[in-house]
């Protein structure tokens, strides 16, 4: 990684606002996941893996709640990892790894995590890879440790309502962009690429994702994720939070 950014807190704030335009209840899912971590650890400082952690949004909130936590942030995006490293400034271990490859675990500083958390990230992976990844994540946890994934997980019994909720969210999101309340996803990345310090990282990113931004999103219902967690060897699994068409599932090793 290069030298710290001059203004990481501003880039972190910008990223959070851009994400909140997509997910107005983003903080609710973070709180639900951290509540589950607290329950599993009994309030002790957790060893936590922020998986596909991007700028470290979960890590920053975990450290605010558990100041003595041992945190690892894993992602592949050089722009987001640069912001994470600059925001966390030595309070977390930063790992550059590709979750589409089964060898990602070899880059971790250790196994035996109390918790592995991820949010709005794994929907870019295909079904067979997510299934395998869940089993791999289990192996990074200590016995009794928790994994939680918050993502787009529509309620399968509410097809029509889910469609209406998504459309309502789209209209509100476009209104935020029009009013200047938030930058859009492409606008945020354009701004990052125009920043003197982030521009080289944006160029690296373009080489990682040369053809298109991501593969097509894959968003099965929460029941699929619960079954995949159980198939991956978790002793129990279920939904710990729901907000509209999004949910957070958790599995206990």
Image (cartoon, helix red, strand yellow):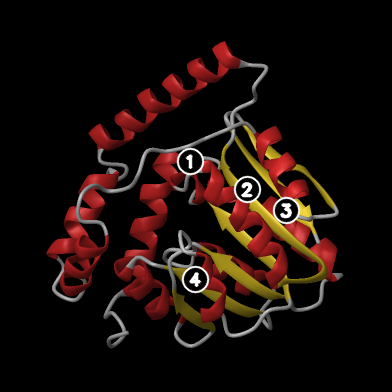
For residue 203, what is the image quadrant?
A: bottom left
Q: Relative to residue 18, is residue 230 drawn left or right? A: right
Q: Is residue 63 above or below residue 193?
A: below
Q: Could you tell me if the residues under marks 2 and 1 are in contact, i.e. CB atoms within 8 Å?
A: yes
Label 3 – label 2 distance at C-alpha:
23 Å
**Does residue 183 appear in this view?**
no
> Which mark, residue 23?
1
Please report the residue visible at 38 percent of the width from the left and 72 percent of the height from the top: 81
**Residue denoted by label 4:** 74
Indicate which label's residue lies in the foreground, 4 or 2. 4
Label 4 – label 1 distance at C-alpha:
22 Å
Instruction: Find numbered disc 1 in the image and state the secondary structure of the residue it sits on.
Output: loop
> Which mark, residue 246?
none
Instruction: Find numbered disc 4 in the image and state the secondary structure of the residue it sits on.
Output: strand
Please report the residue visible at 38 percent of the width from the left and 79 percent of the height from the top: 86
Please report the residue visible at 36 percent of the width from the left and 23 percent of the height from the top: 171
Quadrant placement of the C terminus: bottom right
Instruction: Find numbered disc 2 in the image and state the secondary structure of the residue it sits on.
Output: helix
Q: Residues within 10 Å of mark 4 (few under 14, many from 20)?
A: many
Q: Residues within 10 Å of mark 3 (few under 14, many from 20)?
A: many
Q: Earlier in the sequence, mark 3 or mark 2?
A: 2
**Does residue 153 appear in this view?**
yes
**Residue denoted by label 3:** 232
Label 2 – label 1 distance at C-alpha:
10 Å
Indicate which label's residue lies in the foreground, 4 or 3. 3
Query: What percent of the width, then of the height, locates residue 22?
Result: 42, 39
Q: Earlier in the sequence, mark 4 or mark 1?
A: 1
Q: Could you tell me if the residues under marks 4 and 1 are in contact, i.e. CB atoms within 8 Å?
A: no
Please report the residue visible at 38 percent of the width from the left and 65 percent of the height from the top: 12
Label 1 – label 3 distance at C-alpha:
28 Å
> Which mark, residue 29?
2
Instruction: Find numbered disc 3 in the image and state the secondary structure of the residue it sits on.
Output: loop
């Amino acid at each position: 990684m290069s030298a710290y950014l001059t203004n990481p807190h501003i880039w972190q704030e910008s990223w959070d606002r851009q994400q909140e335009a997509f997910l107005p209840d983003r903080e609710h899912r973070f709180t639900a996941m951290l509540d589950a971590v607290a329950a599993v650890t009994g309030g002790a400082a957790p060893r936590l893996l922020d998986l596909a952690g991007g700028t470290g949004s979960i890590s920053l909130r975990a450290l605010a709640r558990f100041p003595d936590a041992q945190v690892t942030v894993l992602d592949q995006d050089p722009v987001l990892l640069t912001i994470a490293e600059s925001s966390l400034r030595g309070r977390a271990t930063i790992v550059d790894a590709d979750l589409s490859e089964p060898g990602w675990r070899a880059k971790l500083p250790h196994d035996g995590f109390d918790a592995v958390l991820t949010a709005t990230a794994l929907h870019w992976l295909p079904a067979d890879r997510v299934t395998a990844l869940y089993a791999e994540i289990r192996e990074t946890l200590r016995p009794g440790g928790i994994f939680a994934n918050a993502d787009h997980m529509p309620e399968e019994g509410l097809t029509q309502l889910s469609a209406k909720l998504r459309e309502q969210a789209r209209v509100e999101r476009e209104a935020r962009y029009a009013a200047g309340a938030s930058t859009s996803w492409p606008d945020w990345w354009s701004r990052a690429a125009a920043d003197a310090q982030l521009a080289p990282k944006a160029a690296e990113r373009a080489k990682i994702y040369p053809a298109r931004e991501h593969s097509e999103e894959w968003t099965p219902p929460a029941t699929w994720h619960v079954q995949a967690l159980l198939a991956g060897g978790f002793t129990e699994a279920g939904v710990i939070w729901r907000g509209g068409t999004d949910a957070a599932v958790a599995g206990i090793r």
